[in-house]
Amino acid sequence: MSISSIYLDAFISVAKTLSFSRAAKQLHVTQSALSQRIKNLEDDLGLTLFIRNPSGIILTESGERLLKYAQIRDALEEEALHDLVRETKDELAGIVRIAAYSSVLRSVIIPSMSNLLFANPKIQCHFICGSMVELPGLLQRAEVDFIVMDYAMEKSSIEKKVLGTEEYVVISSKKTTSRDDIYLDNNPDDMATENFMRFQKKPVKYKRSYMSDCYGIIDGVVNGIGRSVMSRHLVDRNLPVRIVKGFKPYTLDVVLHYNSQPFYTRLQKAVIDELTRNSSKFLK
C-alpha cells in the first residue's frame, strides 16, 4: 500500500497549522477540496487522523504517528537528493530546526552548533525561542526537529538527552537601589521564580513583572526594576549585578528532546552529537 503524495501533503499542512482554512490557503485549494483529501486519506488508511471540536482540531495518536512518518520521509528524501549531487563526500546539508527557552538558546544552543554549521555551510539551521509552555507543541506539530527544555517530558515516543544542568540564583542590581519585592520573569506562564521560591526553606513574599526574555530581565535588574531568579551561567562578571546571598542552590537539567525514529539521517545524528558533546561547556 502506498500513500498518495497529494493526500499526505494535505495532511502535513493541516497537522502543522491545525487549521483547515490556513492549510487550504497554503496549498492554494478550496477548503472543501482539502477536507475531501483528508477524508480520502482517512478512508484509505482506515484511521481517524484528526479530532474536530468547537475549539479547533487536534491530532489523534494515529495522526501523530503519521506526522512522524512524514518527517522521516522528508528528511531522508532531502538527504538522498543531496548525496546524489554533493561535491564533497562528507559534507552535510539540509534544514534543521531547534527550539529552546531563552536562557539557553543564545548562550548554549547556538554556540554549541557553531562549529558544525561553519564546517557544513549547506546546513540551514533555524533557531526558535519559545516558552516552556509552547515548546512541546512545536515538536508535536512537527514545526521543529528538536526542543530543549528544563525538564524531561514523560512520553515514550520521544527521545531525551540531558545536555547539562543550570544552577539558578537570585540577582540584584549593583549600580542602583532595586525593589526587592519585585521579581522579573519572561511572562505570566514562566514558573522559574515560583519553582525557585517553593524550593526555599522560608516563604518569600514577592510580586512579578514581565520583561519578555531573559536578556530583558537582566536589563531590568541592572536598572533596578526588580530582582530576578536567573541561571548562574548568564551572570557575567562584567555586568553590574550581584548574586543575593541566603538562598538554597537550585538546579535543573537542560534536556534535549526529539521524536523516536527507526533511523536518523546523518544530519540529525550530527546535531544530536554536537549538542550532547558541547552544551555542558557553556553551562559551567
Image (cartoon, rainbow, N blue to C red):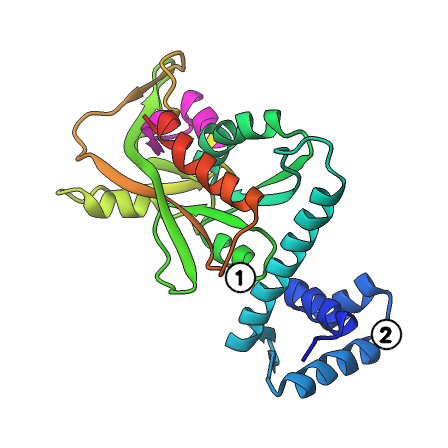
Q: Who's the residue at 30% across and 19% down the image?
A: 242
Taking 169 as reference, is 19 above or below it? below
Q: Is residue 60 visible?
A: no
Residue 229 on the magenta span: yes
Rendered location of residue 274, percent (x, y)? 46, 34
Q: Secondary structure at mark 1?
A: helix
- Callout 1 amino acid: Gln
Q: Quadrant of the C terminus?
A: top left
What range of the chain is rendered magenta?
Answer: 216-233
Task: Return the residue at label 1.
Answer: 140
Which tag, 2 or 1, sits closer to the chain's start? 2
Taking 72 as reference, is 224 above or below it? above
137 displayed left or right of 205: right
Q: Is residue 272 visible?
A: yes
**Alpha-carbon span between mark 2 and mark 1:** 26 Å
In the foreground, 257 or 243: 257
- Callout 2 amino acid: Thr
The circle drawn on residue 30 is 2
Which callout, 2 or 1, points to the residue nearer the camera? 1
Residue 265 on the magenta span: no
Rendered location of residue 249, percent (x, y)? 20, 34
Q: Who's the residue at 38% across and 18% down the image?
A: 236
In the foreground, 15 or 4: 4
Q: Who's the residue at 44% across and 31% down the image?
A: 108
